[in-house]
Amino acid sequence: MTELSDLYRDVIVDHNRRPRNAGRLDCPTHQAEGDNPLCGDRLRLFVDLQDDRIRDLRFENAGCAISTASASLMSEAVKGRSRAEVQALFESVHRMLTEHGAAPAASLGKLAALAGVRQYPARVKCASLCWHTLNAALAGSADPVTTE
């Protein structure tokens, strides 16, 4: 299990240091802002939704390593997926982060690297902020998302 934990840690460090899909999207069809006041994480998502699929997603953030890595991993995982697929992915990630003993679903791929966050309850909000913000963006909500 130590090798798997090391691999997961390496994935999180890599996505924090070199976040994928960071930056603005010129003409988003959807966008939302999120805030985790406890940790100070702030996130802005830009989504290009075409034919009920996420064609592109970018984000701007100022936050901790977990928040940045989670947004980066999420951005890679949701591109090309439908709203229904994104919702199912959200539910799998949420279960992995919050349910004691829940093993990461094989379908999560690199997102499984976030499984260790469950050991630190205060950090679950850091890892889930981007997912809640994506849900708000896809719902067309103008209200900022907060984890408090």
Image (tube, rainbow, N blue to C red):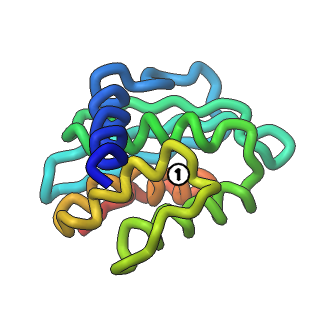
The picture places residue 39, in percent across and down from the top left corner, at: 14, 52
The picture places residue 38, in percent across and down from the top left corner, at: 13, 59
Q: What residue is at 37 percent from the left and 34 percent from the top?
A: 11
Q: Nearer the viewer, residue 65 or 39?
A: 65
Q: What residue is at 20 percent from the left and 69 percent from the top?
A: 121
- Whether residue 85 is visible here, answered yes or no, is yes
Residue 53 vertical placement versus 132 (above, below): above
Q: Nearer the viewer, residue 88 or 5?
A: 5
Q: Is residue 63 left or right of residue 68?
A: left
The picture places residue 143, in percent across and down from the top left corner, at: 43, 58
Q: Is residue 87 left or right of residue 67?
A: right
The picture places residue 3, in percent across and down from the top left corner, at: 32, 44
Q: Is residue 98 left or right of residue 50?
A: left
User: How many labels sit on residues?
Assistant: 1
Extreme-right residue of the structure: 51
Residue identifier under label 1 = 134
The quarter of the image holding the N terminus is: bottom left
Q: Secondary structure at mark 1?
A: helix
Dot 1 amino acid type: Leu
The quarter of the image holding the C terminus is: bottom left
Q: Quadrant of residue 107?
A: bottom right
Extreme-bottom residue of the structure: 100
Dot 1 crowding, Cα within 10 Å, few <14, some 14–19, many 20+: many
Q: Nearer the viewer, residue 5 or 141?
A: 5
Q: Quadrant of residue 129?
A: bottom left
